[in-house]
Image (spheres, helix red, strand yellow):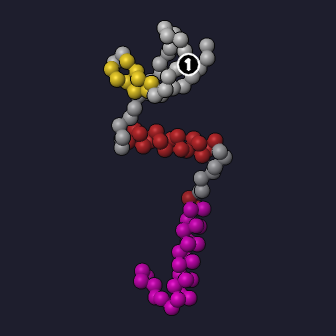
Amino acid sequence: MRRMRVRGVLVSPDTVRLHQPLPLPDGSEVEVLAESPLARGSLPLMLATLEAIHARLEAAGHRPPTPEEVLERIEAERASWEKEMQENGETHLLG
């Protein structure tokens, strides 16, 4: 049995309108696999999306920075701001 993937819209409980025709003769038996949609803006949708993103990143070999690396980057950025402000003769307003 050959697998094909075609999307469609459920127009009634027992009718699916496909976005493109299937190259099968009339009367062919097909199996329909439906994904249960999550509400737009829902917490489960956000968590599922983040999980999928993290899985793709991990599969690509991405390693997230450690908390120490993040702090190091933040401090380096702050230091660059301080240096730029000193070079421009500006005063620091936060401390």
Q: Position of residue 18 (x, y in %)?
A: 45, 24
In terms of secondary structure, what is the magenta stretch mainly? helix
Q: Is residue 30 above or below residue 21?
A: above
In the image shown, does 72 or 6 lie closer to the viewer? 6
Q: Is residue 94 shown in magenta?
A: yes
Q: Secondary structure at mark 1?
A: loop
Q: Quadrant of residue 14?
A: top left
Query: Residue at the right extreme?
Result: 61
Q: Which residues are magenta?
A: 69-95
Q: What quarter of the picture does the N terminus occupy?
A: top right
Mark 1, Cα crowd under 10 Å, few <14 / some 14-19 / many 20+, is few
Q: Is residue 87 above or below residue 6?
A: below
Query: Residue at the bottom extreme?
Result: 89
Query: Residue at the left extreme?
Result: 12
Residue at 58% over, 72% down: 76
Q: Position of residue 34 (x, y in %)?
A: 44, 24
* Total numbered circles: 1
Residue at 41% over, 39% down: 45
Q: Is residue 40 left or right of residue 19?
A: left
In the image shown, does 8 or 74 lie closer to the viewer? 8
In the image shown, does 87 or 66 lie closer to the viewer? 87
Q: What quarter of the picture does the C terminus occupy?
A: bottom left
In the image shown, does 52 or 23 lie closer to the viewer? 23
Q: Position of residue 33 (x, y in %)?
A: 47, 21
Q: Position of residue 40 (x, y in %)?
A: 36, 40
Q: Is residue 17 above or below residue 39?
A: above
Mark 1 residue type: Pro
Q: Quadrant of residue 60?
A: top right
Kindly identify which residue carries mark 1. 23
Residue at 40% over, 38% down: 44
Residue at 55% over, 72% down: 77
Q: Is residue 94 above or below residue 61?
A: below
